[in-house]
Image (cartoon, rainbow, N blue to C red):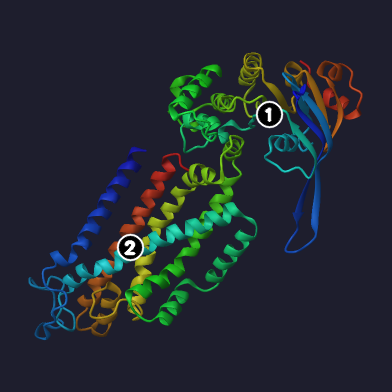
Amino acid sequence: MKKVKFRAVFMIVLVVLFLILIFFGKQIAPNDPYVSNLQAANEAPSAQYPFGTDNLGRCVLSRILAGGAASVYSAIFIVTAVFFTGTVIGLVAGYGGGWVDQVLMKITMVFQAFPGFILAVAIAGMLGPGLENAMISLMAMYWTSYARLSRSLVLQVKNETYIRAAIMCGAKKRHILFRHILPNIILPLMTAAVSDISNVVLSMAGLSFLGLGVQAPQAEWGLMISNGRQFLQTAPWAIIFPSAALFVSVVLFNLAGDCVRDAVNDGGGR
Amino acid sequence: MASDFILEVKNLEKVFRDRIGQGGRVEEDVAVKGVSFQIQRGECFGLIGESGSGKSTTAYMAAGLLKPSGGELLFHGTYMQMVFQDPMKALNPRRRVLDNICEGLIYRRDGRSKAEIREEAFKAMDLVQLDRGYADRFGRELSGGECQRATIARAILAHPELLICDEVTSALDVSVQAQIISLLEDLKNKLGLSYLFISHDIALVDSFCDRVAVMYQGKIVEMGKTRDIIENPKDAYTKRLIGSVLTL
């Protein structure tokens, strides 16, 4: 119990430090991430450029620090947005039942009928490249799982005896939803959300890699990997370090999700 | 007009309809059929029968938690409350015991302040002999008997005239069963409650109920004073039910 709590706190501290680092990335970057210096193009890591430079002579470390915001904060924003919309849709469908449930679930089925990332690529392609459009397309891809999860949790909980008891006591629908159902389903949903951040970070990088997300010259990890790809043999650092940044953030959020889940299960939550 | 009866049930009927497959045929399951009985004020009325005989369905309809398919329900009172079979599941696991008990009054909005409701809830805890120290605990930290006391406290906090008890002792072990029954007896005398007491345990019904109805396959097969029925059963099913009780 204590160990689990300690691990959870440790992971939260790590995640917060990581987020602060990325938030102030532009300020702590050793060089200007947007100034190109063609004389220093594809330079190996050195004291001035710790992670080397890319094909336009821009500092890779500075670009990683500056690009984190587009990768990680947009992922957190997307997850927060789909967490709220998905949860509300699932609540309405699960508690409302009947034709409301039928209609909402048929809509989620339509979204889920396509492989997730293909759907995101199609929507991003239709809307045109850019960070906002990429975010919209990823939201369209991710909201369904929250809607389905929260609906199934509501269905599990809504016929519990304590809800019948609340009805006997004269509880209105909003009381039942907010006092009884929501507190009993929110923790599994939050666990899913924290674990999902890493998936969204990867999807976002994927869209940028394909040229559908963040556009050059803006720094973003997926885009940097895509640019560095052509110089893999002469300047591997331009692709290795952004990939490593992506790797670290994915592992970090996955572990954080696991810790949250363990802490929730340990706390007697259901 | 004040009626002698607190609850009148006339020709109550419940049919569950299940659709088999997509747009397929509808399967009908008659759970309760033509059930009629009256409960007098201050009376303890028992409903016994085997699992699936429709006694819990009748209780849920009487409580207003299930819509009857037919028949009439007349409640000559202001409030009724229900105590459920599994006490562990009857308390919201995310809320403290006191908050769970306060539910009995919190939705009524009759001018009572939150502090007053809490004070009344503490008194209800005293009445059901639940230590006030449990107020800030969660249901999972309590034993089954303590949980059941908490749910009874919630029920009586609402000042009901009729208390529906659906197999309230089935999930508890024997020594605790006896405590809960004596608590219910005690509350009956102190608060003038009437009971609709659902059980499959004849011995329990014998010790607690004034009158009893025996249900079998959704119908009442025999009804009368508890002693009369147990000593002189007329219906074949009742005879079998009583005969099946182990005697020590």
User: On what subunit does the disc labeled 2 rest?
Assistant: A
At x 45% / y 65%, what residue is drawn? A142
Work out which residue is located at the far left of the displayed protein and give it: A47
Where is residue A148 drawn, in percent x and y?
A: 53, 59
Q: Nearer the viewer, residue A256 or B54?
A: B54
Residue A128 vs B97, above or below: the answer is: below
Where is residue A203 drawn, in percent x and y?
A: 38, 70
Where is residue B205 drawn, in percent x and y?
A: 75, 21
Can residue A62 be seen from the camera position used here? Answer: yes
Does residue A92 appear left or right of residue A50 in this picture? right
**Residue A123 picture quarter:** bottom left
Amino acid type, residue under disc 2 in the picture? Val
Where is residue A224 drawn, in percent x and y?
A: 25, 77
Q: Nearer the viewer, residue B132 or B117?
A: B117
**Residue A230 picture quarter:** bottom left
Can residue B216 be seen from the camera position used here? Answer: no
Q: Which residue is mark 1?
A: B164
At x 70% / y 37%, what residue is drawn? B60
Mark on residue B94? none
Amino acid type, residue under disc 1 in the picture? Ile
Does residue A205 appear left or right of residue A270 in this picture? left
Does residue B74 appear left or right of residue A226 in this picture? right
- What secondary structure is found at the residue carrying circle 2? helix
Q: Which residue is mark 2?
A: A250
**Residue A228 picture quarter:** bottom left
At x 46% / y 26%, what residue is drawn? B118
Q: Nearer the viewer, residue B16 or A42?
A: B16
Badge 2: how crowded within 10 Å, few (<14), some, or many (20+)? many
